[in-house]
Image (cartoon, coloured by chain):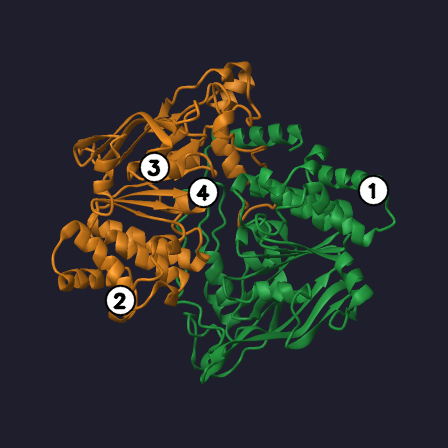
C-alpha cells in the first residue's frame, strides 16, 4: 500500500545545553536524538510517551517552532528548515497547532471573534471585514460554539469551550495538517469525549491530517491510525495503532499498556512493573536506552544499540529480543467483554442511542 | 469489614454552600468509611468532590462558606461539620490529606526532612532527633532510595513521582487512620501512577488505614476502590460497592461518564458523551440536578429523586432506575 507522505522527519536531533557557566561544565540534554518518521496524508498519527521522552520537543521541531540540531523536516517533500518570509507564512497556513492548555494559549485580551479572525487577516487578506465575520461565525459553528460567542473573551468559557476556540483558530487558515500537543488531556472525561468526537468530524469534513502528541494510551488508541512510542528521545516502536496496542513488540510499550488501569471491575491483569525512573536525557544509558528498567534486559542490551526492525507489516520495534518476548509472554492487555450485567448493557445501548438522537 | 464493626469515619447529611448563594455546593451528602476500605468519590470538575474532602479537614474558608448541617463522626467522636477548629485538629494527625500537585503542599524553601519533622513535632512533640528518625522511617516506608540523604534535599531536586512519595510520607508520618487523597496520581505518568497506587494499597494492608480517593479516572477507581460514590453537582447520585457500580451502573450520569472513556480494548467506536457542562452554583436546576444534561429527562425530574436502594449496598438517585424496564415499558 503506497500512501502519500505529507510530513517527514529525517534523523532529527535536538540537543539543548543546560547548566554550565561560572566554571561549571554544561550538560547536553538530548531531548530528541535521532527520530525519523513519516506521516501519511489523511491519517491521524500519534506520538506517545511519558514526561521527558521528548515528544513535545519533537512536536515543536515538526512545527518549526524550534530548529533541529541535526536532521530535517519535510512538508510535502520540501525542507522547512530554510523557510522564511512568504514561504514560512505559507507553511503556517498549511500547518496549524492546537496546544494542551486552552487557558494559556489564547490571548485573554482578544475577543473570540478577533482570535479566530486573526489568522484570516494574515492568510486571506482579500476578505472584507464582513466576509471575515461571516467566516468566523461559520468556524465557530463547526466547532460547536455559537456565532454570538464571537463578542466574548476567553475567560468567559469553560476549558472544553476554550479548546474548541483553539481548534476554530487553527482551522481558520484552511490548514492541511494540524498538530495537537496533548489537545484533550486538560479536559474532564465527558468534555474530552466531546472534543475527540469533534476533532474526528472536522478531520473528515476538512480533509485534514492530524498529528496528536499525548500520554493517554486509550485516547491515542481511540483517535489514531498509526502510533509512534517514544522513550528517552527516540522512537522505540511504531505501527498501526490497533496492532501495536493489541500486540506490542517493545517491552516499553508492553509496560506502558500494562500500567493503564482499565475501567472494568475485577480486571486485575498482570502488571509489568518498571524498576525506577526514566534516566536523565543528558546521560542516556549505553546500548538500548531502556535496558536500565527493562525486566528482559541481557548483556547484549547493555552493549549494543538495537535497530528498528520490522516485526509485522507496518510495525517496527527497536528491541534485540522482541520475537522471544512476544513468543513467551501473551498480550499485556486483557481482552474479555465489558464485565457488565445484561441490564447494564441495555442501559448503555439506550444511552448511546439517546445521545446519538440528540446529535451530540 | 464485618457487619458489627463501627465505621472509622461517618459523614451524615453534609450540606453547605457559599454565603452569597442559595444553592448548596454540597447537598445532603452521607458517606461511611470502614477500616482497610478505599472509598472512591468520582465526578467531573465542579461536582463537589474536592470541597467535600476539604470540609472534612476543616479547610473551607469560614468567611465565604455557610455550613447548613452535617456531622462528621470519626473514631467514635461526633463533630459538627461547622466546627472547623475541632476538625482541623484531626488534620495531619489522625486524618491526613494528599493533593494532586505535590509542589503546592511542599514548601520549596525548606529541606524535605524539616518539613516532615515539623509535622511530627506539631502533633507529637518530642525532640528533633526523634522526629528525624520518624521522618527517615516514613521516607523508607514509601520506597524512597537513599532516604537519609534525601532528608537534606529540597523538593525541586526530586522527580514528580518522588515528590508525590515525599508527600505521602509526610501524610503518613503520624500513622493516620484515614487518608484522603485528592487526585493523587493525576499529574503522574502512567507507570509512576501504578507504583504510587500500589504503594498506597500496600500501606493500607499493613496498617488497616481507610482511604478516601477523589478521582475522575474510572480506570483507577476500578482498580483500587472497595466502594464508589458518584457525585454530580454536589449530590451523590449513585453509591455502592465497586463491583455493583461497574457491573450494574444505574444512574444516567454514571453511564454517561463510563461511555465517555476511551478504552484500550474492544471496538473503536464513537464515544457517547455527556453533552453540555456541569451547572454552576448560581444556576442549579430544580429537582434532579442532572436533568439539564440527561438524555432521558422527563417532567417528573423536576422533583428531587431520593437516593433509593437497588440491591445490596447499591443506591441510586434516579426516578427511572432501572432505565431498561422503567423507560422501555413507559
Q: Nearer the viewer, mark 2 or mark 3?
A: 3
Of badges 3 and 1, nearer the viewer stands 1
Mark 4 or 1, which is nearer the eye? 1
Q: Which mark is residue A354?
A: none
Which comes sooner in the sequence, label 2 or label 3?
3
Name the element at disc 2. loop
Question: Share a chain, discs 4 and 1?
Answer: no
Callout 2: chain: B
Name the residue carrying label 3.
B60
Q: CA distance from mark 4 to mark 1?
A: 44 Å
Q: Which mark is residue B151?
A: 2
Q: Is residue A323 left or right of residue B248?
A: right
Cα gap from disc 3 to disc 1, whole angstroms: 50 Å
Q: Earlier in the sequence, mark 2 or mark 4?
A: 2
User: How much space separates mark 2 and mark 3, taking CA atoms?
Assistant: 31 Å
Task: Kindly state the secondary structure of the residue where label 1 is placed.
Answer: helix
Left or right: where A324 falls relative to B163:
right
The answer to whether residue A4 shows anywhere in this view is no
Q: From the image, tell me which residue sits under label 4.
A: B216
Q: Position of residue B131 (x, y in %)?
A: 17, 60
Of tags 3 and 4, which is closer to the observer?
Answer: 3
Marks 2 and 1 sit apart, C-alpha to C-alpha, by 63 Å
Where does the image place residue B285, in percent across and percent down from the top left? 51, 22
User: Chain A in the picture: what colour?
Assistant: green
Q: Is the residue at mark 2 from the same chain as the one at mark 1?
A: no
Chain drawn orange, letter?
A: B
Amino acid at each position: 500500500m503506497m500512501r502519500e507522505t505529507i510530513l517527514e522527519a529525517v534523523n532529527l536531533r535536538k540537543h539543548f545545553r543546560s547548566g554550565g557557566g561560572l566554571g561549571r561544565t554544561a550538560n547536553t540534554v538530548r531531548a530528541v536524538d535521532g527520530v525519523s518518521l513519516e506521516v501519511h496524508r489523511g491519517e491521524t498519527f500519534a506520538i506517545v510517551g511519558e514526561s521527558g521522552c521528548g515528544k513535545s520537543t519533537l512536536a515543536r521541531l515538526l512545527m518549526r517552532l524550534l530548529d533541529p540540531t541535526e536532521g530535517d523536516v519535510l512538508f510535502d517533500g520540501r525542507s522547512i528548515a530554510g523557510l522564511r518570509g512568504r514561504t514560512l507564512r505559507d507553511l503556517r497556513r498549511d500547518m496549524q497547532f492546537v496546544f494542551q492548555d486552552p487557558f494559556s494559549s489564547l490571548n485573554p485580551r482578544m475577543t473570540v471573534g478577533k482570535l479566530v479572525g486573526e489568522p484570516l487577516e494574515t492568510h486571506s487578506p482579500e476578505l472584507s471585514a464582513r466576509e471575515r465575520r461571516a467566516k468566523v461565525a461559520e468556524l465557530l459553528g463547526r466547532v460547536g460554539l455559537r456565532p454570538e460567542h464571537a463578542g466574548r473573551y476567553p475567560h468567559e468559557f469553560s476549558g472544553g469551550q476554550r479548546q474548541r476556540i483553539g481548534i476554530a483558530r487553527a482551522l481558520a487558515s484552511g490548514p492541511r495538517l494540524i498538530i495537537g500537543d496533548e489537545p484533550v488531556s486538560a479536559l474532564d472525561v465527558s468534555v474530552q469525549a466531546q472534543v475527540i468526537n469533534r476533532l474526528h468530524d472536522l478531520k473528515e469534513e476538512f480533509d485534514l491530517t492530524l498529528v496528536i502528541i499525548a500520554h493517554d494510551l486509550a485516547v491515542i488508541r481511540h483517535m489514531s491510525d498509526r502510533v509512534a512510542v517514544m522513550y528517552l528521545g527516540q522512537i522505540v516502536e511504531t505501527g498501526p495503532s490497533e496492532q501495536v496496542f493489541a500486540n506490542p513488540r517493545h517491552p516499553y510499550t508492553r509496560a506502558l499498556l500494562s500500567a493503564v488501569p482499565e475501567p472494568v471491575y475485577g480486571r486485575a491483569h498482570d502488571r509489568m512493573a518498571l524498576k525506577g525512573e526514566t534516566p536523565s536525557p543528558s546521560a542516556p544509558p549505553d546500548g538500548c536506552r531502556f535496558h536500565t528498567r527493562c525486566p528482559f534486559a541481557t548483556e547484549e542490551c547493555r552493549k549494543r544499540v538495537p535497530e528498528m526492525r520490522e516485526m509485522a507489516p507496518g510495525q517496527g520495534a527497536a528491541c534485540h529480543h522482541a520475537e522471544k518476548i512476544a513468543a513467551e509472554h501473551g498480550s499485556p492487555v486483557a481482552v474479555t467483554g465489558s464485565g457488565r450485567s445484561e441490564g447494564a448493557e441495555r442501559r448503555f445501548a439506550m444511552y448511546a442511542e439517546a445521545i446519538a438522537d440528540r446529535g451530540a | 469489614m464485618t457487619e458489627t464493626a463501627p465505621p472509622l469515619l461517618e459523614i451524615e447529611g453534609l450540606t453547605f454552600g457559599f454565603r452569597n448563594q442559595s444553592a448548596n455546593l454540597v447537598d445532603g451528602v452521607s458517606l461511611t468509611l470502614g477500616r482497610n476500605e478505599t472509598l472512591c468519590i468520582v465526578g467531573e470538575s465542579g461536582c463537589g468532590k474536592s470541597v467535600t474532602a476539604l470540609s472534612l479537614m476543616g479547610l473551607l474558608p469560614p468567611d465565604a462558606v455557610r455550613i447548613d448541617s452535617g456531622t462528621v463522626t470519626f473514631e467514635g467522636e461526633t463533630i459538627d461539620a461547622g466546627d472547623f477548629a475541632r476538625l482541623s485538629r484531626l488534620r495531619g494527625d489522625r486524618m491526613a490529606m494528599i493533593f494532586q500537585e505535590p509542589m503546592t503542599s511542599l514548601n520549596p524553601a525548606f529541606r524535605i526532612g524539616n518539613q516532615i519533622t515539623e509535622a511530627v513535632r506539631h502533633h507529637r512533640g518530642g525532640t528533633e532527633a526523634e522526629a528525624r528518625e520518624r521522618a527517615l522511617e516514613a521516607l523508607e516506608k514509601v520506597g524512597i532510595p537513599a532516604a537519609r540523604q534525601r532528608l537534606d534535599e529540597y523538593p525541586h531536586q526530586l522527580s514528580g513521582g518522588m515528590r508525590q512519595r515525599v508527600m505521602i510520607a509526610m501524610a503518613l508520618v503520624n500513622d493516620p487512620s484515614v487518608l484522603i487523597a485528592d487526585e493523587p496520581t493525576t499529574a503522574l505518568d502512567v507507570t509512576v501512577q501504578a507504583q504510587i497506587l500500589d504503594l498506597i494499597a500496600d500501606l493500607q494492608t499493613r496498617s488497616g488505614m481507610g482511604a478516601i480517593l477523589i478521582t475522575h479516572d474510572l480506570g483507577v477507581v476500578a482498580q483500587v476502590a472497595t466502594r464508589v460514590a458518584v457525585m454530580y453537582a454536589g449530590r451523590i447520585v449513585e453509591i455502592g460497592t465497586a463491583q455493583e457500580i461497574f457491573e450494574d451502573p444505574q444512574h444516567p450520569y454514571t453511564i454517561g461518564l463510563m461511555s465517555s472513556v476511551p478504552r484500550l480494548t474492544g471496538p473503536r467506536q464513537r464515544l457517547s458523551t455527556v453533552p453540555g457542562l456541569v451547572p454552576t452554583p448560581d444556576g442549579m436546576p430544580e429537582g434532579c440536578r442532572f436533568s439539564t444534561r440527561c438524555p432521558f429527562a422527563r417532567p417528573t425530574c423536576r422533583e428531587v429523586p431520593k437516593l433509593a436502594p437497588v440491591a445490596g449496598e447499591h443506591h441510586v438517585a434516579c426516578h427511572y432506575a432501572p432505565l431498561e424496564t422503567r423507560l422501555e415499558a413507559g
